[in-house]
Image (cartoon, helix red, strand yellow):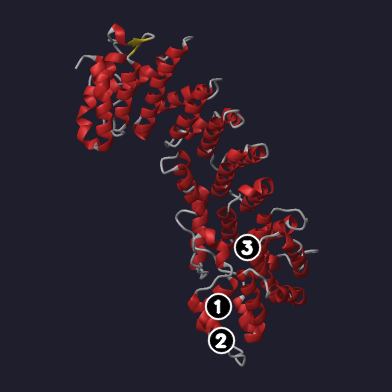
Amino acid sequence: EKHLGVLTSVMSLLNGLATQQTDEYGVLIPNVVHILSVLVLKKDCAREYLYYRTPSPWLQIKLLKFLQLYPDAIEGHDISGMGGNDHVGQLINVVTRIMFETEVSDSINKSNADHAILFEAVNLIVAWGTTCPAEMREGAMNILGKFISVREPNIRYLGLSTMAQLAQIDGSVEGAKKHQATVLVSLKDADISVRRRALDLLFVICDTDNAERIVDELVAHLVVADASIREEMVLKIAILAEKYATDLRWYVDTILKLISISGDYVSDPIWHRVVQIVTNHPQGDLQGYAAATLFLAVSTHRCHETTVRVAAYILGEFGFLIAERPGMSGEEQFHVLHQHWYNVDTQTRSILISSYAKLANLYEECRPLVAPVFAKSKNSVDVEVQQRCAEYASMREAFSPEAVEDLLREMPPFEDKRRSALELRLLETEGENSAAVTKASTPSEVEQQRAMLNAQMMDEGMAPIEEQEEPALEEEMGGADAEEDEKIAAVAANPTLVGIPKDLIPAMRKAFSN
């Protein structure tokens, strides 16, 4: 069919059919390439279908969209000559012509039409991936670099979005990193959509080399960021800090900064992840560093409640590592935590109660301080607080000191899942096709090294605890299965017992300490 109006209509139908049954329409690729080459290379077009001297831009866009459904169209073909007579050679010539011969026009209408075609050509290069010639990918990156620095917000938006997709192709991220300064400027754009795309692109181009700079820039910008984008920024900063932290102490510091700047936007999975990472990495002084840092963070009367939650858990587990330092004894740890007791909700109080029980177990001087808290809270209107206080208070009366010490010792490492709760949250908010989701699901070199160290640790005999859903971590810290409750009640009902059968200890440890 030579009538461009009919062709345009047919391509709309063809794109819809090919989207549903891609394999059935692959044989039409040579025909589509031929029509595209006639429009782009020969400029053969009826006068009534010229739009500001551009041959039927709507048809060109639909043809390019059809070709994007077949990312393997050029794989296995010799494209080094760039000028063959077969359809693959024609296609390479067409895309090259669109990319490098599209000129800026004074006419807004013509620029819009030409840029629409250009972006679809770049999207085709993105679809081809590594099968596309490297020089074409590099050329596309340079073009997008110009687009993200123009004044027109729509062009910047498309440029940032497309560059994020192009940067995911192996070997292309270095080209995107050259435009890092421009992307950081776009993060302060007046248009919220442009800021979101800039955040996505920074997330994609982040790696071990530039992670600290990008994360620090994002944290600094978080102070002045709009409320509409803060939650997304906090989530992505937390993921980047974890993926590329060569020193996990920097990761802990970064999360504490997030809490201090935007604590209301730090969801439970973020601080749960801090707890898991600190627990799972006994190597070096990470646990002691985290305990000391959180001790100082909650020493002030004014700190965010999320900080109190993290500090309560970490000091309960690893506070003994800093107890010999000046001003950080077990008694001091109790005081800095308990000063927040009346300013936090029942969920945080439940975590504090577990920490108090562990402090009282380790430090005899803490027991007279903890006992009144438990006695007073036995009548709390909150069932969780009441139950914890009643169980912890009666524990020493029912069990031997050795059994209580075994129940309240620090927890073993958590089991690492393939996808953390943070990645699942990102997937939920942005969808499977998001560039950020693809980036987050790809393990970094740092994460692979940590996984090897954890595997070695497991081989040495430190078995991980079974990890439940991360958002339910606070429930794990005090909840118990009905069967375990029955076992504990049966032992507690007989006050003459001074020891605990060894087969009951794991269940009881989960009930009292997990």
Q: Residue at x 51, y 61 (%)?
A: 454
The answer to whether residue 288 is left or right of residue 228 is: right
Foreground: 234 or 122? Answer: 234
Label 2 crowd bin: few (<14), some (14–19), many (20+), radius 10 Å: some
Q: Amino acid at mark 1?
A: Met
| Sequence order check, earlier mark of 3 and 1 | 3
Please tell me whether residue 463 is drawn above or below residue 306 in the rendered image. Answer: below
Q: Secondary structure at mark 2?
A: helix
- Place residue 335 in its image quadrant: bottom right
Q: CA–CA distance between discs 3 and 1?
A: 21 Å
Mark 3 vs mark 2, foreground winner is 3
Q: Residue furthest front?
A: 381
State yes or no: discs 3 and 1 in contact (Cβ < 8 Å): no
- Place residue 393 in its image quadrant: bottom right
Q: Which residue is mark 2?
A: 491
| Quadrant in the picture for the C terminus | bottom right
Label 3 crowd bin: few (<14), some (14–19), many (20+), radius 10 Å: some
The answer to whether residue 110 is left or right of residue 382 is: left
Q: Residue furthest bottom?
A: 496
* Numbered badge on residue 508: 1
Q: Secondary structure at mark 3?
A: helix
Please tell me whether residue 112 is drawn above or below residue 201 in the rendered image. Answer: above
